[in-house]
Amino acid sequence: MRRITLWLVTTVAVVVLLFSYRTSTMGASAPAAATAAGANAPGIVSGSTSDAAGAPPDDPTDTAPADPSSGTPSAAPTGAPTDAPTAAPRPTATTAAPKAASNLVVNGTVAQTRWGPVQVQVHISGNKITDVKTLQIPNGNNRDYEINSYAVPQLHDEVLQAQSANIDVVSGATVTSDGYIESLQAALDSAHFKG
Amino acid sequence: MTRRAFVEQIMGLPVSVHVRGPQAGFDEAATAVADLFAELRMIDAVFSTYRPDSRISALNRGEPVRDDLVDTVIDLCEQARERTDGYFDAHLPAPAGGTWFDPSGLVKGWAVERAAARLAGYESYVSAGGDMVLRGSWRVGIEDPARPDRMLTVLEVADCAVATSGPAHRGAHIIDPHVGAPASGLRSVTVLGPSLTWADVYATAAVARGPAAMRWLAGLAGYEALLVRDNGDLLATPGWPTRG
């Protein structure tokens, strides 16, 4: 009889160990994704998914596998209750995805320009670009300042107006050499400049 | 895909050359672009009205000039005057009376078309201050003359020339030769067609002519145009590509 209870207790401990192991990796992956989005990783970043990502910070589960490793059955009851709340946030994270479809925030990939890295964030609402934000623009010397104060804001306006960032070249009434630095063509050239 | 951009200031204009595709990375492409820029500088030295040592300056001083390029341009300017019913005229009234010959309005488009031939076989574009020769398919943004940082429209066009004229960047610099005063009624005219020389001449002539140029432009075979009136209204010839 004592052997049976010992066997029961050890199996429960093993099961708890297994459960707590699984939840600890899930708990660790959620905050990792949130920090990656904060560092402007390219891809979809939705306002609603950032709220969901903040919900499951289940750090206490990390302590659970440490206690059962000692072999004492007393660890089993403390590990079991922490298991339940960590499983709950999972469905809310997945339901956030369809919600984001009507109101998307997308980070572009980092474009290496002559003056340094440029990255934009595009806000899309109902298939329309509603805003374009510059996440990364080069700064430092005077040359960078010129590019930042003219070319980047104008690219911003242009994207809003034309609903497209894929313009290769601009036709307009004669741009003089003086006006060139303020022109969108200068921004397009700088993105591919190799001369 | 490899894409390289080159920019030089020639004829007082920023000249942007973009080469795209697998060949863009080759040294041959960079050499062809360098030759293109050299040709534009050579033409500028011949035709610049700002340089006293240019052939055009010599011609205007009444000196004898024997030059095939000058002869070609004189001939083209005469054709341009005829094709535009006199709205393009390189013979401008001189401050001291009489006329002087200033082919600048034609030379830019002609020079870029001529030099861009060096990039035949390359997916490329050459844009001199917003007037361009395209090889392969490119997305061209047409600038809003009221807000030069915004686009009126975006066209996806291939193997053609695009020229835009208007007073947007230089003040009222296009004179209606029939009245001798700055033209009015149009903010800008963009012409699309096979030759940059003629697209540019037609765009300039249309600005000088005003909104009435619409019917004349619609009758030009192989060329399409987009006009922006002073009130911001857009007018386009029937064949203007509406899908970008």
Image: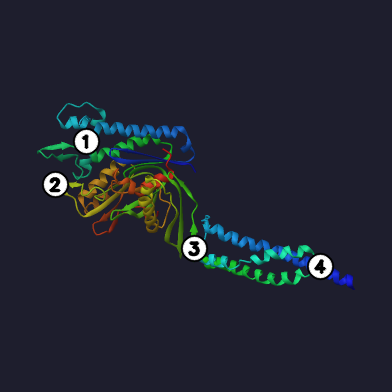
Give the side of residue B75 with respect to residue B31, left or right. left
Q: CA distance from mark 3 to mark 1?
A: 54 Å
Q: What label does residue A11 carry, if any?
A: 4
Residue located beneath label 2 in the image: B180
Amino acid carrying mark 2 in the image: Gly
Q: Estimate the x, y position of residue B191 in percent, counting from the top left.
A: 30, 48
Q: Are marks 4 and 2 in contact (CB under 8 Å)?
A: no
Residue located beneath label 3 in the image: A104
Chain of residue at mark 4: A
Q: Tell me the crowding category of disc 1: few under 14, some 14 to 19, or many 20 or more residues within 10 angstroms, Cα based.
A: few
> At numbered mark 1, what does the secondary structure look like: helix, strand or loop?
loop
Amino acid carrying mark 3 in the image: Leu
Question: Which residue corresponds to the image point at 29% horizontal and 57% vertical from the top-left?
Answer: B234
Q: Quadrant of the C terminus of chain A?
A: top left
Q: What label does residue B50 carry, if any?
A: 1
> At numbered mark 2, what does the secondary structure look like: helix, strand or loop?
loop
Q: Estimate the x, y position of residue B90 in percent, counting from the top left.
A: 19, 39
- Nearer to us: label 4 or label 2: 4
